[in-house]
Structure formats: structure tokens, C-alpha cells
Image (cartoon, rainbow, N blue to C red):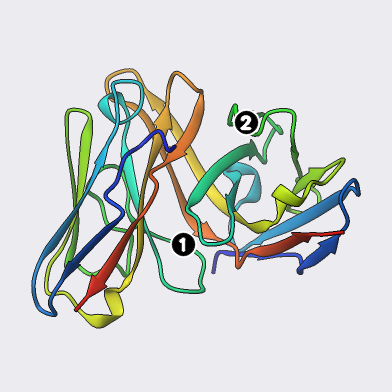
């Protein structure tokens, strides 16, 4: 059971938009910054979003992040088949004094 | 170019010890943390622990405290994850990643992993 809760799966058609939610508590998302990671099949995770809504160099602006209260959201617009992957949210948990990840969401682009 | 290169796959028996490595290059090794993340077969990412390469300050997830030891050697820019007695349930892919942890009174902790190693597959089987 992960500290952060994500939907197990989401799906949408190519060209459409999708959002992935990440729910936590005041000890993690509520008072700390959120990051998001993309893990393509058979590869290591890659940082997509940090500090709630910032994109590292090279990440297209089709990917966006937001945070409100104890929840965060990853948005992906203009879906491509290459976006099919597992997506994870992450943050620091002040009660645990450790980082935590969500359980992951599998994105299917139909 | 920032690179984290991990040691190769391991096959071990229950009860054996193991130390896997993660060599950083292309950046100031002592200015960043190195974290370890477990991914069991078909499962999600689990945050295990993190070490600050500059002074070896180490933090562990409660789930992994006492189960593994994380360390760093700044002379070789290498971080390590070790077990003293492996179990079959330790079978997993292990990733190292360059970590950022900053605390701000007004906005809390900034924590994320910006570069990742390729992973080390550890198989524990009798």
C-alpha cells in the first residue's frame, strides 16, 4: 500500500488529453513539492516534472503538473503512442523523513 | 553529461551478502544525494534510502531501515547498496538516481531524482 494514491490505469485516444491524479496527505503532498516520473517499458524511470510544475530541459510542454492541497495532477496533451508508459508521482514525507512514490499509473494510448 | 552507471546483474543464494554499486560522473558528486529505488517484478517504484555524497548523511525509508546499508565513497564517486543476508523477496531491479533535497521554511521540501542509472537486477534463489 503506497503512501500516495494513483489510479492504476488511464487510457485515451491519440491526440487527446489525459490527467493522472496523485493523492496524499498534509505530511507529504500538502506541505512539500511533487515530482513526476515516466517509465517506458523495460527502461529506467525519467524525471518529467519537478517542483510541482517545472519541466526539465528536453521535456515537451505537452506535459504539465499542478498541485492543490494534498493532491497533485499530471496532465498530458496531444497524446502519442510513444507516451504509453507507467507514470509515478513522488514527494518527501515529513512524518517518515523519507521520500515516497505513488503506486503508479499505466497509461494506454488506444 | 551526467551519468550514473550501475554494476551488473547478480544471482545469489538466500543468506548470502551482496554489495552493488553506482558510479557517478559528469557532475560535482559531492554536491548531490544518491538515492536507491527498488522495483520488484511487475510492481511499482519503492523509495529505499538516500545518501549525501559530500558527508555520507543517510536517510532510510522505515520499510528498509535495518534491511540494507547505503553508503558513498567520494574518492571514487561511487554509491553502494548492500545486504548482509539476502532473502528471496529481495529479488528485484534496483535503480540508483541523483537526488535533490532542499528544505524551505515557507514551502517545505523540494525532493526529486533528476538522473537515473540503468538498473541492477538482483535475483535471489536457492
Distance between the Cα atoms at labels 1 and 2? 20 Å
Q: Which quadrant of the structure image shows residue B60?
A: top right
Q: Residue at x 75, y 38 (%)?
A: B68
Q: Residue at x 37, y 53 (%)?
A: A104
- Dot 1: few (<14), some (14–19), or many (≥20) neighbours within 10 Å? many
Q: Report which residue position mark 1 lands on.
A: A45
Given residues B76 and A65, the one toward you in this image is A65
Q: Residue at x 12, y 74 (%)?
A: A78
Place of residue A70 in the rendered image (x, y in percent of width and height, measured from the top left): 22, 29
Q: Which quadrant of the structure image shows residue A2?
A: top left
A98 over A57 or under it: above or below: above
Q: Residue at x 87, y 40 (%)?
A: B84
User: Which chain does tag 2 point to?
Assistant: B
Given residues A38 and B93, the one toward you in this image is B93
Q: Report which residue position mark 2 lands on.
A: B60
Question: In the visual, does A72 lie left or right of B25?
Answer: left
> Quarter of the image containing the N terminus of chain B?
bottom right
Amino acid at each position: 500500500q503506497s503512501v500516495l494514491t494513483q489510479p492504476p490505469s488511464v487510457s485515451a485516444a491519440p491526440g487527446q488529453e489525459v490527467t493522472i491524479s496523485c493523492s496524499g496527505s498534509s505530511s507529504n503532498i500538502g506541505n512539500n513539492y511533487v515530482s513526476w516520473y515516466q517509465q517506458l517499458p523495460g527502461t529506467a524511470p525519467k524525471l518529467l516534472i519537478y517542483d510541482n510544475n517545472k519541466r526539465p530541459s528536453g521535456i515537451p510542454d505537452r506535459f504539465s503538473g499542478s498541485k492543490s492541497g494534498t493532491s497533485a495532477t499530471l496532465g498530458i496533451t496531444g497524446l502519442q503512442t510513444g507516451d504509453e508508459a507507467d507514470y509515478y508521482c513522488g514527494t518527501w514525507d515529513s512524518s517518515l523523513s523519507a521520500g515516497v512514490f505513488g503506486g503508479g499509473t499505466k497509461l494506454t494510448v488506444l | 553529461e551526467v551519468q550514473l552507471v550501475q554494476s551488473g546483474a547478480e544471482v545469489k543464494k538466500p543468506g548470502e551478502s551482496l554489495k552493488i554499486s553506482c558510479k557517478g560522473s559528469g557532475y560535482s558528486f559531492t554536491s548531490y544525494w544518491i538515492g536507491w529505488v527498488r522495483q520488484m517484478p511487475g510492481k511499482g517504484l519503492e523509495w529505499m534510502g538516500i545518501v549525501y555524497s559530500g558527508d555520507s548523511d543517510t536517510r532510510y525509508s522505515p520499510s528498509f531501515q535495518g534491511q540494507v546499508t547505503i553508503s558513498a565513497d567520494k574518492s571514487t564517486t561511487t554509491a553502494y547498496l548492500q545486504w548482509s543476508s539476502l532473502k528471496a523477496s529481495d529479488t528485484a531491479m534496483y535503480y540508483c538516481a541523483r537526488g535533490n533535497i532542499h528544505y524551505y521554511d515557507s514551502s517545505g521540501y523540494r525532493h526529486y531524482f533528476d538522473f537515473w542509472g540503468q538498473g541492477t537486477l538482483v535475483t535471489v534463489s536457492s
